[in-house]
């Protein structure tokens, strides 16, 4: 991505994020009370975060690949299963992935 | 702020510090995605909603188009609108204070504010402002540290950063999987993304995953 496109991402994301936050203070509550909207809105972060997990762990460009990052995700999953705090989850993933990367 | 109940102060501070510290991971992810230290810090100052920031830099890192990055980040931010709707009658802010409140309307400030309900309205307000500004300060401080650290370390894969970013998303996703339906939604989204990845331009499968949310949320279950 070009340098100017990266500035576009930064500025557009910032403006939209702020507008989205401010919207909550401006619209009447009933506007967003639609149950279908609420159900979908509750699921959107789950779909997006799930997509980001696999897209970052198992994808290179447009290919599905299994590489050293799998060890990292496995370590993160193990840490979450034993209720480790967030920094431990991230650090164990980094450690396991880096280890496999260097051994490989 | 006069007469802030001690437990409210304690809740706000502990959330601010622990959540703010995740900023290290964002700072590192931003630099690893190819953003400069300045741009990475501006994300935390101006966008200031963690999951969206991670999403924007992740889509860029995966070679996606600028529009995919902005749309993915914005869709992750829409829950902040619902937070604002809940907070507006509590905070009753106008003018500049309203702009300030909107900027710090995030998961943590809303969560602490609502959790103070048994201690009364003043405690809820204090919880919102203390947590919002506290997370803002620490998140930005730690973003700078993470960005400088990643710049000094070099190749992201050799210190595991390429796995730390998806692990961070998994860590953000995990506490939301409160029941089997939500776990099913997460699993379905993951399978869907892996299936469509070879057929779409890089970065687009992430945004497209919201189709799963719409499909599952459309009908009352």
Image (spheres, coloured by chain):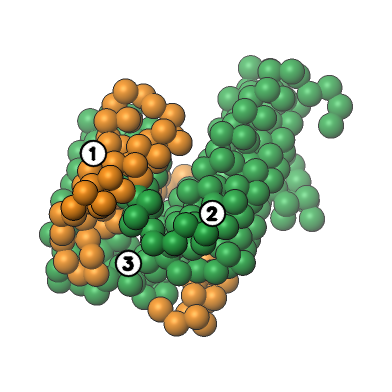
Chain colours: A orange, B green
Question: Residue under mark 1: which chain is it in?
Answer: A
In depth, the one of A19 and B53 nearer the eye is B53
* Residue marked by disc 2: B149
The chain letter under disc 3 is B
Instruction: Please give the residue where the numbered disc 1 appears in the rendered image.
Output: A74
Q: Are marks 2 and 1 in contact (CB under 8 Å)?
A: no
Relative to residue B207, is residue B5 drawn left or right?
right
Circles 1 and 3, Cβ within 8 Å, touching? The answer is no
Q: Residue at coordinates 36% horizontally, 75% vertically from top-left?
A: B65
Pick whichever, A69 or A46, lies toward us: A69
Quadrant location of residue B9? top right
Name the chain under label 2.
B
Do discs 2 and 1 belong to a common subunit? no
Q: Nearer the viewer, mark 1 or mark 3?
A: 1
Q: Nearer the viewer, mark 2 or mark 3?
A: 2
Q: How far apart are marks 2 and 1 (CA)?
A: 25 Å
Examine the rendering and report whether any part of residue A27 can be seen: no
Mark 3 highlights which residue?
A: B62
Image quadrant occupied by the C terminus of chain B? top left
Disc 2 element: helix
- Residue B152 lies, in percent from the top left, at 52, 59
**Side (left or right) of B120 relative to B106:** right
Q: Are marks 2 and 3 in contact (CB under 8 Å)?
A: no
Residue A64's x, y, as percent?
15, 61
Q: Is residue B197 left or right of residue B146?
A: left
Q: At 21% across and 49% down in the image, what residue appears?
A: A103
Seen from the viewer's position, the closer of residues B173 and A85 is: A85
B140 is higher (above) or lower (below) than B112: below
**What residue is rendered at 38% in x and 58% in y?**
B156
- Same subunit, labels 1 and 3: the answer reads no
């Amino acid at each position: 991505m070009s340098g100017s496109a990266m500035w576009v991402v930064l500025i557009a994301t910032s403006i939209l994020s702020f507008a989205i936050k401010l919207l909550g203070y401006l619209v009447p509550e009933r506007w967003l009370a639609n149950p279908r909207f609420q159900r979908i809105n509750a699921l959107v972060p789950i779909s997006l975060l799930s997509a980001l997990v696999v897209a970052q762990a198992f994808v290179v460009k447009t290919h599905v690949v299994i590489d050293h990052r799998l060890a990292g995700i496995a370590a993160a999953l193990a840490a979450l299963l034993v209720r480790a705090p967030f920094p431990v989850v991230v650090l164990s993933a980094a450690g396991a992935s880096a280890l496999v990367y260097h051994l490989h | 702020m006069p007469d802030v109940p001690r437990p409210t102060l304690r809740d706000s501070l502990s959330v601010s510090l622990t959540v703010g510290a995740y900023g290290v991971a964002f700072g590192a992810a931003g630099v690893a995605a190819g953003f400069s230290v300045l741009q990475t810090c501006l994300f935390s100052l101006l966008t200031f909603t963690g999951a969206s920031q991670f999403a924007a830099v992740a889509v860029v890192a995966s070679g996606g188009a600028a529009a995919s990055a902005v749309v993915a980040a914005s869709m992750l931010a829409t829950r902040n609108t619902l937070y604002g709707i809940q907070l507006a009658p509590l905070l009753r802010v106008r003018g500049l204070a309203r702009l300030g409140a909107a900027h710090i309307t995030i998961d943590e400030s809303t969560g602490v504010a609502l959790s103070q309900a048994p201690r009364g309205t003043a405690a809820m307000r204090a919880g919102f402002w203390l947590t919002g500004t506290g997370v803002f300060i620490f998140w930005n401080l730690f973003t700078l540290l993470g960005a400088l650290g990643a710049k000094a370390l070099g190749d992201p894969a050799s210190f595991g950063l390429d796995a730390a970013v998806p692990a961070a998303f998994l860590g953000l996703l995990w506490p939301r999987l409160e029941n089997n339906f939500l776990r099913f939604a997460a699993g379905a989204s993951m399978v869907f993304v892996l299936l469509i990845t070879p057929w779409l331009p890089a970065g687009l499968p992430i945004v497209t995953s919201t189709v799963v949310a719409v499909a599952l949320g459309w009908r009352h279950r």
